[in-house]
Structures are given as C-alpha cells and as structure tokens.
Image: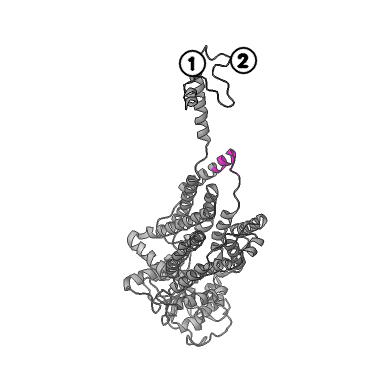
C-alpha cells in the first residue's frame, strides 16, 4: 500500500516505450517548453486525425443490411407501379370478390360456359380473398400494395435466413438486391405465387433456427396451414422438411467425410414436425384431397405441354442464364471450399435439375442460392475503394428507383382487347377469345371458353381450344357445339385469316389489338355439320383464302 501511494504521488511516472517527463530532449529537437501553445496545437491535430478516422469508418453491418433491404423493396415498388394489369391477377381478384360476396368457397365454376358443370378447386383461395379485400379497402392501389408487401416480406425473410447462416453487412445487402432484381417480375405478375415466395424462405429460416433451438420447429405446422390455403406449392415446403430430416439421420462421420455442414441434431423432433406439418396441410376447405389435387396438377402432361411457365427455360435470355449460372457457381464454390451446407446444397442441386425441365421452379432456385451465398466462408473486409464503388452503385440504384416511370394504378395492359370488349358490351352472346385474354373476359363479366385457370380446363376442353387455335381441326364444329356467337382474336393470325374467309363468319369490329368476328344469322350448316360438345372433334381442311 505504501508503494502504491508513493507511485501516485510521484510527478514522474514512466510508461512503456515512453521517456520520462523530465528527460532531456535530444540536441537539435524543438523545445516544447519554450512554446506553451504547441501542446494545444498537438491536441487539436490529434482530435482532427481521430475525426477523420471516424469519418472513414464504414457503416455498421446492420445499417448496410437495412439499406440493401430498403433499396430492394424500392426496386420491387418501382416495377409494381410501372406494370399495368393483365393475366392471372384479373381472374384472381374476380374469384376473391365472388367469395367475399357469397361468403363461401367456390363450388361450380361461375366464370366459364365450357366447365360450368364442373367444380373449380381454388387452391389459392386465401390469396384471392386477400387481394379482393385489398381492392375493397384501397381500390386500384391494391395491386401495387399486394406486390410490395409480399415482395418485401420475401426479401426480409431471405435476409433473416442469410444472417442465421452467418452472412453480415454487405453480403446480406448483396443477396437481397440480387433477389429483388430476379424476383420483381414474378412478384408483380403471379399474385398467388407471391405468398409462396414468403413462405418458402420462412420455411428455410425456421429450419436453420431449429438447429440451435428445437422449439422453432413448432412454427412449421401453422406455416403449412397458411401455405396450403394460399398456394399449391406447399408440397415443396414439405419436401424441404423431409430433406432436412433425411440428412439428420445420416451418421456424422459420413457427413464430415463429404464436407457437410449445418446438420440438424434433432431427428426425432424433425420427424414429429414433419408429421404435424403434413396433418396441418389437411386443414383446408377441401381436406386432404387438396394435396393430391396439387400433386396431380404438377404432373399433368397436358398442362406442361401447353403452358409456358411449365416449359423448359429459354437460355437465349441473359436473365435466364444468370438465374441458372449464379446458383451453379455457388455450388461449385461450396465444393471447392469443402463446406457443403447439407440442406441448401441438396435443394440447389435438385431445383437446378428440375428447373431445366420447367422454368416455374427458377424462383425457388434463386431463394436457395441466397442461402448458399450466405454460408460461404467470410471474406476479408472490402477496401476503401471497393466501399466507395459500392456506395456509388447503390446511390445510382436509388436514383433509378426514384426516377422510374409509373402507370396509373389499376390501368389495364394495352395488350388486352379493351376496345373489342367495349364494342361487345352491347352485344350479348358467348365469346371465344385467346387464352391470355380469357382473364380479361372474366374482368368484363363475360363467360369464357378457357382462361388462365388451366387446371380447370385440362382434358377435352383444353384440347379443343388448342385444336381451334392451331387449326388442327375445322373450327366451326367446335364453336357451333358450344354456341359461340363471337370470336375475339388477334389480327393477322392463322385463325383470324381463316374466319375472315369462312362464309359462316363476318368481321364486325377491327381494333389495333383484336378483330371481332360474329356468326352470320344463317350459317351454311351444310358445309360443316354441328357436333355435340361431347363428340370428338373432326379433322377437316381449312377453306382456301
């Protein structure tokens, strides 16, 4: 205690690597004792240097992630506000409005005249009711709000999932921005799928969290209840849980030998969660039969033959190449580092192969690729130059988002036959129109031959439609069998040219988008006899122009 007191009281306390306070200055060195202001100037210089260092200090990782998330949501908002209405969203909101008005789930189809006797299984009924409720609440802004909220939910869930896998700061922001660029077109186009793009990364997030705390697994059953009532892709969510369970049963020595990481340590709890999730998927207005229905739709050869989103990708598109090359590069990187996140690598490989068969899978491949990117080993911090370059890019993206043009909310795409249906508003009768225009026909309260609800028409009706469209049979027997009064079709196409030279039909209206053909009052029935809808279509040569 005496030594300590003496040390405190001493005026000359030497420190490591420092000369005593009263040490003699070297010859020729400037004297600080002669200039009392030099100490003040030195302190000011040190303070300025500290301030400069603080100014160069990078943003906290969390702030970078929030900035990336804000820009990603902003990009989705810019795309949503710049896209007019078309396609599936038109029948989706009509279906939701019907259910809200009748306080019931769909029974017999109310929108077509070809399948009015058939029950329509609306596996997306929840998303349709949400969209229609938004339309009631906020009017035409509902479509943009729907896309922005669900797109933002997808990005938030993906960012949280990336953080659980170890990503921080700039890597999380980069994952979010790349996902926003890849998913924006899908989010603003396919309204039912939007919910699936939230549930899928949440499924991955819950499983990643459960590797540390098994209690997270009990969020999976309620998640599946929400999923199965908003989109048919709930089967994919169950497959994800099954893959996680399968890897948890593999011996650890085998996992270590292949370089596997992130193995779930609770196989029994996973098995219970999978069983509970499967049972939860039965909680629908249709019971367990809805899962069987969704499975049959995904494997229906007629749907995969005729519908573009079920076709193999078009690799002439630069965007499509990126969607597949980026996950492939990330898989190679995982193999190179011998750090294979088991669930993510398995899903990426399976979705990559399946995505080559049907482009509908590509959106899920992108979300899994975000998990692969997050699980790669951490890299050294970016240099000052790299950070400045990234800041310039982000600032430019922000300017682009703010300057992006928009269309009036709720406006219909100019590709829809608006003028043709305006003409037909005062002409009652059945209409045969193009597949993509059937959705607009529902919006105008005109019954359809077929429309975007492909699963409802699979079978005879879909075959007849494409036979007429492609002129593989004479059109009039099928059109007469269904008592079609008007044909609304794009000009200068095969069917339009055929009908223009068919004496049973005449052009009654021409617009920039569509021509309207009306059946003549007394058609030449001797040329082509009528057949019943149930009879097989006849093959006949087209009349010469």
- Taking the magenta stretch, the answer to whether it contains residue 383 is yes
**Residues packed near mark 1 inside 10 Å, few (<14), some (14 to 19) or many (20 plus):** few
In terms of secondary structure, where does tag 1 sit? helix
Residue in view at x 47 percent, y 48 percent: 66
What percent of the width, then of the height, locates residue 228?
A: 45, 70
Residue holding disc 1? 37
In this rendering, would 149 be left or right of 370? Answer: left
41 magenta-colored: no
Which residue corresponds to mark 2?
A: 26
Residue 163 to residue 60: above or below: below
What kind of element bears circle 2?
loop
Q: Residue furthest front?
A: 2
| Residue at the top extreme of this rendering | 34
Residue 191 appears in view: no
| Of the pair 7 and 446, the residue shown nearer to us | 7
**Viewer-proximal residue, 448 or 458?**
458
Q: What quarter of the picture does the C terminus occupy?
A: bottom right
- Near-viewer residue (17 or 537): 17
Relative image position of residue 394 (x, y in whole percent): 52, 45
Mark carried by residue 470:
none
Gap in angstroms between the C-alphas marked 2 and 1:
20 Å
Point out the tag, 2 or 1, that comes first from the N-terminus. Answer: 2
Query: Which residues lie in the magenta part?
Result: 379-390
Horizontal side of residue 454 vs 26, given as left or right: left
Q: In which image quadrant can residue 91 be found? A: bottom left
């Amino acid at each position: 205690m005496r030594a300590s007191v003496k040390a405190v009281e001493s005026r000359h306390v030497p420190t490591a690597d420092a000369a005593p306070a009263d040490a003699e200055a070297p010859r020729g060195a400037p004297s600080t004792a002669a200039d009392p202001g030099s100490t003040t100037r030195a302190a000011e210089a040190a303070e300025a240097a500290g301030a400069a260092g603080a100014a160069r200090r990078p943003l906290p990782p969390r702030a970078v992630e929030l900035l990336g998330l804000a820009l990603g949501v902003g990009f989705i908002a810019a795309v949503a506000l710049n896209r007019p209405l078309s396609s599936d969203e038109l029948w989706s909101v009509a279906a939701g409005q019907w259910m809200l008005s009748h306080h019931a789930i769909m029974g017999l189809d109310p929108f077509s005249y070809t399948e009015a006797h058939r029950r329509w299984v609306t596996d997306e009924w929840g998303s349709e009711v949400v969209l229609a409720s938004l339309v009631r609440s906020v009017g035409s802004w509902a479509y943009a709000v729907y896309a922005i909220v669900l797109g933002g939910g997808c990005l938030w869930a993906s960012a949280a999932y990336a953080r659980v896998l170890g990503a921080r700061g700039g890597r999380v922001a980069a994952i979010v921005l790349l996902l926003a660029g890849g998913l924006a077109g899908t989010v603003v186009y396919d309204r039912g799928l939007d919910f699936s793009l939230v549930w899928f990364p949440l499924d991955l997030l819950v499983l990643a969290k459960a590797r540390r705390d098994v209690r997270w697994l009990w969020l999976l059953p309620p998640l599946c209840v929400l999923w199965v009532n908003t989109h048919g892709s709930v089967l994919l969510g169950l497959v994800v849980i099954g893959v996680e369970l399968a890897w948890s049963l593999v011996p650890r020595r085998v996992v270590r030998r292949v370089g596997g990481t992130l193995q779930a340590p609770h196989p029994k709890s996973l098995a219970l969660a999978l069983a509970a999730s499967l049972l939860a998927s039965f909680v629908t207005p249709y019971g367990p039969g809805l899962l069987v229905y969704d499975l049959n739709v995904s494997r229906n050869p007629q749907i995969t033959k005729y519908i573009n989103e079920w076709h193999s990708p078009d690799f002439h598109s630069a965007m499509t190449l990126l969607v597949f090359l980026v996950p492939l590069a990330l898989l190679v990187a995982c193999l190179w580092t011998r750090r294979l996140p088991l669930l993510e690598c398995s899903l990426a490989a399976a979705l990559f192969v399946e995505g080559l068969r049907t482009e509908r899978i590509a959106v899920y491949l992108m979300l899994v690729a975000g998990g692969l990117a997050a699980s790669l080993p951490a890299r050294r911090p970016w240099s000052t130059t790299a950070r400045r370059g990234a800041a310039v890019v982000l600032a430019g993206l922000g300017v682009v988002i703010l300057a992006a043009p928009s269309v009036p909310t709720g406006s219909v795409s100019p590709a829809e036959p608006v003028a043709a249906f305006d003409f037909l508003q005062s002409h009652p009768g059945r209409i045969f129109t193009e597949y993509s225009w059937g959705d607009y026909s529902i919006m105008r309260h005109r019954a359809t031959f077929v429309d975007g609800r492909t699963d409802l028409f699979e079978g005879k009706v879909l075959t007849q439609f494409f036979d007429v469209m492609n002129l593989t049979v004479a059109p009039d027997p099928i059109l007469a069998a269904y008592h079609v009064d008007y044909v609304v079709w794009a000009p200068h196409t095969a069917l339009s040219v055929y009908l223009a030279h068919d004496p049973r039909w005449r052009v009654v209206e021409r617009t920039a988008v569509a021509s309207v053909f009306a059946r003549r009052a007394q058609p030449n029935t001797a040329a082509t006899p009528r057949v019943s809808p149930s009879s097989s279509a006849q093959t006949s040569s087209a009349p010469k122009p």
